[in-house]
Amino acid sequence: MEKASRSKVYVIKTSDRREGVKELLNRSELKGLSGNRIAIKANYNSADPFPASTHIDTLSSIIGELKERGNSMVLAERSGMGETREVLEEMGVMELSQEQGFDVVILDELEGSGWIQEALESSHWKRGFLFPKLFRDADAVVQTCCLKTHRFGGHFTMSLKNSVGMAAARDPGDGYNYMYELHSSRLQRRMIAEINTAYEPAFVIMDGIQGFSKGGPESGTLVEPELMIAGKDRVAVDAVGVSVLRLYGTTKEVGKGGVFEQEQIARAAELGLGASGADEVEVVPVNSEAEEICSGIEQKLEERF
């Protein structure tokens, strides 16, 4: 990305998801998508309610706004804690797809021809990973994630970690278990960042109306920031999310060191996926109610330990 310019991360204080999505998508840098085939990655790792999973109103609002701009959409998902099709049924996604007219692809059901082998130079993956061809073929990729910590080694799960649900759990050819490799590795957080080299999102919307400041991903200590956050730079978006968790008091892993020293964020920045420091992030309050917390976020971004 162009280091001369700062990555804008937009923050709105609201408990109204439709208002939040509309206002965020009306930001000048985020509103340009029209007439495209868009692939959407939401956060349906399990059938647990928000903030464990994408709130159905957030997904509905994003779909509705993008449809108004003349886009067609496909949502692709893979759950890690449950059968994906059952999770999407239980969370209302399949019903919503009928109501709003978008396609749903269950990534677990893709055959070998639906995957691309990704082999990043200097990767920490032993044999690379498999990434869905449909995201590569789309005109644009949109991601929506939640605000939460992750007690199984990720430390936090926002936009970078949400990309894990794009990669194959197993190789459909030989059955190799990529997720076992990921979750058993001490390099897990670097490997999470490396999945993100396979694509570039048009934008990310993080629903931080509520979040988990400890625990996660499916349950934890509930906080209520009443924020929605968006940007094109997923590294900057995650850095803002980590800063929000620090404002509320979080785990020792998420609270340790500078925000940009967090391993997911540091590796993603090293790979050129986004901002590499607080001086490359501009936190933009969308409404006056967000101004105070945006000042707090900026302070957390700049803290040195």
Image (tube, grey):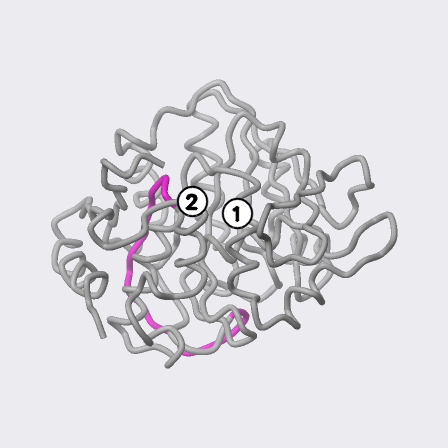
Confirm whether the magenta stretch covers residue 200. Answer: no
Q: Residues within 10 Å of mark 1 (few under 14, many from 20)?
A: many
Residue positioned most to the front: 122
Percent of width and height locating residue 44: 58, 56
Residue positioned most to the bottom: 252
Task: Identify which residue is drawn at 65% across, 53% down.
Answer: 88
Q: Which amino acid, mark 2?
A: Leu
Q: Depth check: give the residue in front, 218 or 295.
A: 295
Percent of width and height locating residue 277: 27, 54
Mark 2 element type: loop
Asked if disc 2 and disc 1 are in contact, CB closer than 8 Å, the reply is: yes
Residue 196 left/right relative to 11: right
User: What are the residue bounds of the magenta stretch?
Assistant: 217-233
Whether 156 is drawn above or below 240: the answer is below
Residue with the mark numbered 2: 273
Residue 121 left/right relative to 148: right
Q: Quadrant of residue 10?
A: top left
Q: Depth check: give the residue in front, 214 or 187.
A: 187
Whether 209 is drawn above or below 220: the answer is above
